[in-house]
Amino acid sequence: MAAPPSRSPWFAIRREVPTHRSGLLMAASFAVPVLIWCVLAYVPLFHADYRLTVVAERQAANTATLTVGDRVEKGYFQDYLDEVAAMNEQIRARVAAGDLDASTRSNTRILRALRPVAESNGLLAGVDTGDSGVVDAKLYELWLAAADGERPELMAALSEENQAVVRGNAEVLRRFPPEDRQSKPKVREPLLNLLPQGVSASPVYLPSPGECIRAFVDDFTTEPPNGQPWMHERLLSSLKVVFGGFGMAVLIGLPLGILCGCYGVFARLFEPFTDFFRYMPAPTFSLLLVAAFGVEGAPKLALVFIGTFPHLLLMTGNTTRTLDANLLEAAQTLGCKRTGLLTRVVIPGTMPHLYNDLRVLLGWAWTWLVIAELIGTKSGLTGFIDVQGARRNFDRVFPVIIMIGLIGFTTDQLLQFAARRLFPWANPGRGRSGWWKRLRGLSARRRDAGVPTSDEPTLDPGKAAVLA
């Protein structure tokens, strides 16, 4: 009986993870954080706040104005509830004492407290919400209908205490003639406030995944107010800043870094000051860049350039200097001249490693985006994050942050995939058909010249390919 095949251990030093396990672990690396997020956002045990579904106007003039959807701490919510309940007790005491005087304005605000509940149940559909008088008249009718049992969906959305408030206020509203219920209702007797209501929710800074998805779709499909850019326009603007600034750094820094890695003259001329300059925080140049280039896109591109160029030049120079000296000696033996050494040995031999350096630096460019888009005129995705964060709309902030991460991750994965095709000699066994033919032709030429072939240990096939 044949012995069962042995399984490779999960933990083995310097061993590659099998393909099926690699895919599983990669999926888990994304699934675990999302699962933790869902647990914290949906499990009531971790909910520290209440999300308001019904609000009431507070008596103190210096208190913050709350709206439906706001999140407040549970202790704060209880104080809020006690305060409004005390206000209602004062109103009942006034009515019991015969004081029936009340302002129409304050009563109108009390009637409007039912509006969010009515809207959530679709009871204001077809009503011109831009006309406050029409809306107030409709709300007047809904208060009476709810008290009479004609709108059970309204009463179901209210607590028992608020249901009693609705029935009590309806008795007051019926004492006024129908003509006072048209346009702006004129109710001049005290009405009780609806008590605050809320549902257990995660903190405001931790919206649920469902809220984030809805907000993300809404931001991409709904026209922004006041002529603000669409989300896809903001995304395009941010991409221009990142890839524009990074592209300029590559065009200048990559060839200059290769020269520094090849020739000591260039290294001594450029690297000392660049090494000094890279320790200067790029954001400190923001005001100078605005003064020099204006407040639109140019200073943003310049900041990304300043943030990436010094590191790119130094990393390129250091990577170029790591080229195996045996390759240079072999090329010179074959009669390669100075220009040929640079174009046929140095650049092909170091380009796979330089390519990986550029992938890392592109990630740095994305980190500079946040600061770059805040200088001058706020723009792009960062401008959106800044505005919505200040308004505590974190359900709209999270999706944009995640989108930036997904774009960066996807770009890096595509570049990594392309590297296997662009530099097959650095990835033996993958996509090497064209370069493998050139390598075999080089081996034949080397044998004719009496130079050890790629089969000998002095020069492996991967390194020899760069001589083609």
Image: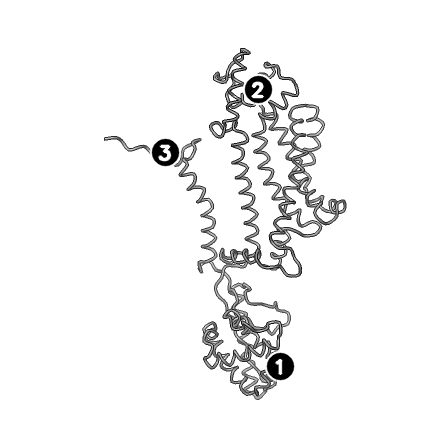
Is the C-beta separation of discs 2 and 3 under 8 Å? no
63 and 164: which is toward the camera: 164
Decide if residue 391 is on the left or right side of residue 48: right
Mark 3–mark 1 Cα distance, whole angstroms, equals 80 Å
The front one of 254 and 94 is 254
Q: Secondary structure at mark 2?
A: helix
Q: Which mark is residue 104?
A: 1
Choose mark 2 or mark 1, whichever is in front: 2
Q: Residues within 10 Å of mark 1 (few under 14, many from 20)?
A: some
- Measured as percent of width and height from the top left, residue 418 is found at 53, 35
Residue 451 placement (x, y as % from top left): 54, 13
Q: What amino acid does circle 1 point to?
A: Thr
Residue linked to disc 3: 8
Determine the residue positioned at 55% across, 46% down. Answer: 405
Label 2 and label 1: CA atoms lie apart by: 91 Å
Asked if the residues shown at circle 2 and circle 1 are in contact, with their CB atoms under 8 angstroms apart, the answer is no
Residue that protrudes farthest toward the right in the picture = 291
Ranked by sequence position, the earlier of labels 2 and 1 is 1
Q: Is residue 235 above or below residue 256?
A: below
Q: Label 2, on which residue? A: 327
The residue positioned farthest toward the top in the image shown: 450
- Residue 308 lies, in percent from the top left, at 65, 38
Q: Amino acid at mark 2?
A: Leu
Residue 302, placed above or below residue 6:
below
- Give the amino acid at mark 3: Ser
